[in-house]
Image (cartoon, rainbow, N blue to C red):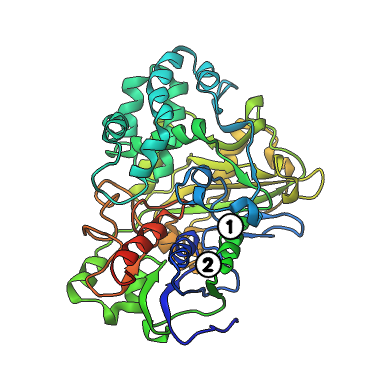
Amino acid sequence: MTTPRRTSYDAVVVGSGPNGLAAAITIARAGRSVIVFEAKETIGGGTRTEELTLPGYLHDICSAIHPLGVGSPFFRTIPLADHGVEWIFPPVSIAHPLDDGTAVLLTRSIDATAATLGADADAYRRLMTPLVERWEKILPDLLGPFGVPRHPLALARFGLPALRSASSLATSRFRTEAARGYFAGLSAHSILPLEMLSTAAFGLVLGMLGHAVGWPVPKGGSARIAGALAEYLRSLDGEIVVGRRIESIDELPPAKAVFFDVTPRQMLAIAGSRLSGGYRKRLERYRYGPGVCKVDWALDGPVPFVAEGCRDAGTVHIGGTLGEIAASERGMWNGEHVERPFVLLAQQSLFDPTRAPEGKQTLWGYCHVPNGSTVDMTERIERQVERFAPGFRERIIARRTITAEAFERYNPNYIGGDINGGAQDLRQLFTRPVMRAVPYTTPDEGIYICSSSTPPGGGVHGMCGYHAARAALRRALR
């Protein structure tokens, strides 16, 4: 465990996920002293990479594919490449296989993607082209707290369809099962029932980013992102202490501002004695969403997908039709473990040879399950993959499964396996963790929350930490 160099700081950050590091970097860039405390021996939060199955097979523990890593307005100001991040862009960002042996393929080209949608090609162009043309104006307004948009016309063009449910947008805009299923797969990243309002926003943002910047993987694993952020922070004279679990805010060195890269439940446990009673009660009512059951595989060759385009894809959405995916997401929201879950797969080693021994492959995948689930979904997940890739099971050398309940034991921020830091429905999308003009602040001077439990929510983008730090620089650190 490293030792702090000072007895007091301008700012202290609890948690070294991308948001905690982003907050620290923003503070350090302003010329203030800052230190980060991390409970584990390694930094990173959701951006860690380890040999989970066999020696020589590198697996991303949580986050794996990073459209927001290259699209984030904050990350675009960080010299990630100078600190070891090399982005790899698969030729196909997303493949969505269908039962007839074909697949919808999302590439950087809208026209090429539309060509895989048959009769819905023109409808797809009309939906996505205006968004992709304006993505740099739209994204900053989406990746922050609710407020007056900087580009209201561009945001309105996005917002009109985005406020709808994914199911209604898909059925009203598209005629084919291929296009409807493809959009359902994008929208299911929300981990919400697709009948809920605003779920279309997730599909539109992820599709927009796929065309605008791609869905890349970092060479060597997602841990490279955290490593680069940490290295950059240290170059700004920021400090990081690992292997130091903070149980109480009283254990921290004196500081003008304390940032918590944790969810409301951990914040209450650590800092509850310093929080006002009304705010504590509101945090106690914060709602967590469904969890995930994740499997990592070591394979003796690529996944033998029937649709060849899937073999060129970094990400594969397994679920087929809108109806099937909607049933899967509705089921997990209602506490069910469905027989045919929607499965998200990542094939990093196809494009990054550092992930597996020569001639071998890794595969990363998960499905959504009820919060706190202890059910092992491995068989159901593998059955879904085998459906579109007969012979898949014969390629498996080793596997490792982590249930939703075990995910929380690994990372206490993943309450019940909720990797998004809380349900991201319309009630909690911009008002997380509670409704405040500046949601990163608390009524208690000098205490801030900067985790994915604040806007804009889950994802490796650093924007929660950036906005929290900017709020502190206007208040406690001005």
**Quadrant location of the C terminus in the rendered image:** bottom left
Does residue 193 lie above or below 118 as drawn? Answer: below
Is 235 on the left or on the right of 8, as rendered? right
Asked if disc 2 and disc 1 are in contact, CB closer than 8 Å, the reply is: yes
Distance from label 2 to label 1 (Cα)?
10 Å
Is 370 on the left or on the right of 437, as rendered? right
Q: Secondary structure at mark 1?
A: loop
Q: Secondary structure at mark 2?
A: helix
Circle on res. 410 = 2
Rendered location of residue 313, percent (x, y) = 62, 34
On the image, numbered disc 1 is attached to which residue? 61
Rendered location of residue 422, percent (x, y) = 35, 57
Going from the N terminus, do you reach mark 2 or mark 1 first? 1
Rendered location of residue 270, percent (x, y) = 37, 78
For this orientation, the residue located farthest to the right is 358
Q: State the residue at coordinates (32%, 27%).
A: 169
Mark 2 crowdedness (10 Å alpha carbons): few <14, some 14-19, many ≥20: few
